[in-house]
């Protein structure tokens, strides 16, 4: 069932419960490998990236079970064998096991991570930081081996606030001797969640959420139960859907405090956004207003992961909108597919200029990556007639059941199978 069929053209009404965060749960799963005990992770989304990480942990010797949204990881018998090429190349996030494997076993042999088609995302920044902590790396054509007989705390200054590199340094530093001072660290909420998980397990980390993080290494770690926060990107995706299609939607459990940039953009576009104890209410009674300049940025700026969903929504705006991508060089893969549906978009360098106002029409389009696929589903909700989105597997990497969620909002949408 690798396609999604949508009959759009109607506003969205209803409510959706926002799933646990993909970007938070994956590094937390990696962190569980550091703990010679049992960890229980609650509110774990059922997405394919979690399935890949479960496979990697199992290959490392962990016992992993997943019931409903509760994930149990028993790392007491972990051995740290080489991870299979299939699992590593299937998921970019496998790179975060680099710091965890070095922290637990002092070595890792791995293929280069895959799963990403939106940019080069080199791992050089990870490797350079870990080398300063005493890691020796041998790179080969199809992979690399990293070893550290003795991880040492040090002062590190990242050249860019990379989320993945920040996570890997934290995971390795928890097991290193002495203190590690990490400057120009990523400030994303997922970093805060990782540090909260590790601190609850006995680590000593301060400064999470700022650009300066201190990790005191070699603190004894123990098993814990931890609840993953809601996914700000999934919540933002559905905000964009309401912007484009109109309607009134309640997003239960949406992490409002992490969504300031998305809420600001939605308000500029003409939506009424309100927060209550029940969740985030989004009301859109008109076509969206065009937005002259949206620029993606590291947190707390507008997320690159929401650029494609917003791009789809702004095709309905009367006027010209401009979206500038500053994080990944190939984030506009969705544009050609939206053009098949009648969108008037042109690319100038790292800017997409959207001349909106024309109604999208249904077409057969193809998801080329995770967030672009989610953007095409939004376009299908907005379009007249039927839209078929192939390569659903990209979308399943980060959305637990996107068809179920849109069905709850009154959309005629089903998972289908293409010939």
Image: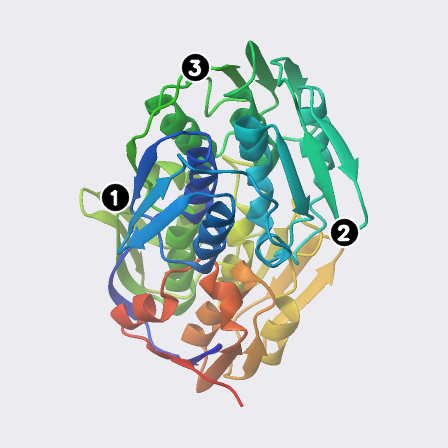
Residue ID for mark 3: 219
Q: Which residue is mark 1?
A: 275
**Sequence order check: which comes first, mark 1 or mark 3?**
3
Is 75 in front, or is 381? 75
**Which residue shows up at 41% across the image and 37% down it?**
75
Q: Nearer the viewer, mark 2 or mark 1?
A: 2
Which of the image's four quarters has the N terminus? bottom left
Pick the front one: 8 or 293: 8
**Label 3 crowding class (10 Å Cα cut-off): few <14, some 14-19, many 20+?**
some
Determine crowd level at label 2: few under 14, some 14-19, many 20+ residues with C-alpha closer than 10 A.
few
Q: Is residue 309 visible?
A: yes
Nearer the observer: mark 1 or 3; the answer is 3
Q: Quadrant of residue 344?
A: bottom right
User: Up-down: is 345 above or below 176?
Assistant: below
- Secondary structure at numbered mark 1: strand
Percent x, y for residue 188?
A: 49, 34
N-terminal label among 3 and 2: 2
Mark 2 and mark 1: Cα distance apart in space: 49 Å
**Inter-mark Cα distance, 3 to 2:** 35 Å
The C terminus: image quadrant: bottom right
Above or below, 223 relative to 362: above
- Residue found at the far right of this picture: 141
Under circle 2, the secondary element is: loop
Helix or strand or loop: what does disc 3 sit on?
loop
Q: In this figure, which residue is indicated by the disc labeled 2?
A: 142
């Amino acid at each position: 069932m690798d396609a999604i069929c949508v009959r759009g053209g109607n506003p969205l009404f209803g409510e959706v419960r926002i799933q646990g965060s993909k970007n938070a749960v994956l590094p937390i799963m990696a962190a569980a490998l550091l703990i010679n005990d049992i960890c229980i992770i609650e509110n774990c989304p059922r997405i394919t990236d979690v399935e890949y990480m479960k496979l990697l942990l199992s290959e490392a010797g962990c016992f992993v079970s997943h019931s409903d949204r509760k994930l149990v990881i028993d790392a007491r018998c972990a051995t740290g064998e080489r991870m299979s090429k299939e699992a590593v190349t299937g998921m970019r996030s496998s790179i975060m096991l680099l710091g965890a494997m070095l922290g637990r076993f002092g070595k890792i042999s791995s293929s280069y991570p895959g799963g990403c088609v939106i940019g080069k995302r080199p791992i050089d920044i990870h490797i350079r930081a870990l080398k300063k902590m005493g890691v020796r790396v041998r790179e080969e054509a199809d992979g690399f081996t990293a070893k550290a007989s003795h991880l040492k705390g040090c002062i590190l200054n990242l050249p860019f606030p990379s989320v993945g590199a920040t996570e890997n340094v934290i995971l390795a530093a928890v097991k290193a001797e002495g203190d590690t001072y990490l400057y120009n660290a990523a400030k994303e909420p997922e970093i805060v969640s990782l540090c909260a998980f590790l601190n609850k397990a006995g680590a000593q980390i301060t400064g999470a959420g700022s650009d300066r993080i201190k990790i005191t290494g070699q603190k004894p770690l123990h098993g814990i139960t931890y609840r993953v926060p809601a996914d700000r990107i999934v919540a933002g995706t559905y905000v964009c859907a309401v912007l484009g299609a109109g309607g009134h939607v309640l997003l239960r459990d949406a992490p409002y405090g992490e969504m300031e940039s998305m809420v600001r953009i939605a308000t500029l576009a003409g939506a009424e956004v309100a927060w209550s104890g029940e969740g985030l209410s989004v009301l859109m009674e008109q076509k969206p207003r065009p937005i002259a300049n949206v620029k993606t940025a590291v947190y707390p700026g507008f997320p690159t992961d929401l650029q494609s969903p917003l791009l789809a929504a702004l095709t309905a705006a009367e006027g010209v909108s401009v979206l500038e991508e500053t994080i990944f060089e190939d984030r506009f893969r969705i544009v050609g597919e939206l053009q098949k549906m009648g969108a008037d978009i042109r690319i100038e360098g790292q800017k997409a200029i959207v001349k909106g106002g024309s109604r999208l029409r249904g077409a057969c389009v193809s998801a080329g990556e995770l967030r672009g696929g989610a953007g095409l589903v939004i376009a299908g909700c907005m379009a007249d007639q039927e839209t078929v989105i192939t390569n659903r597997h990209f979308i399943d990497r980060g959305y637990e059941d996107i068809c179920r969620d849109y069905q709850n909002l009154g959309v005629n949408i089903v998972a289908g199978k293409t010939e």
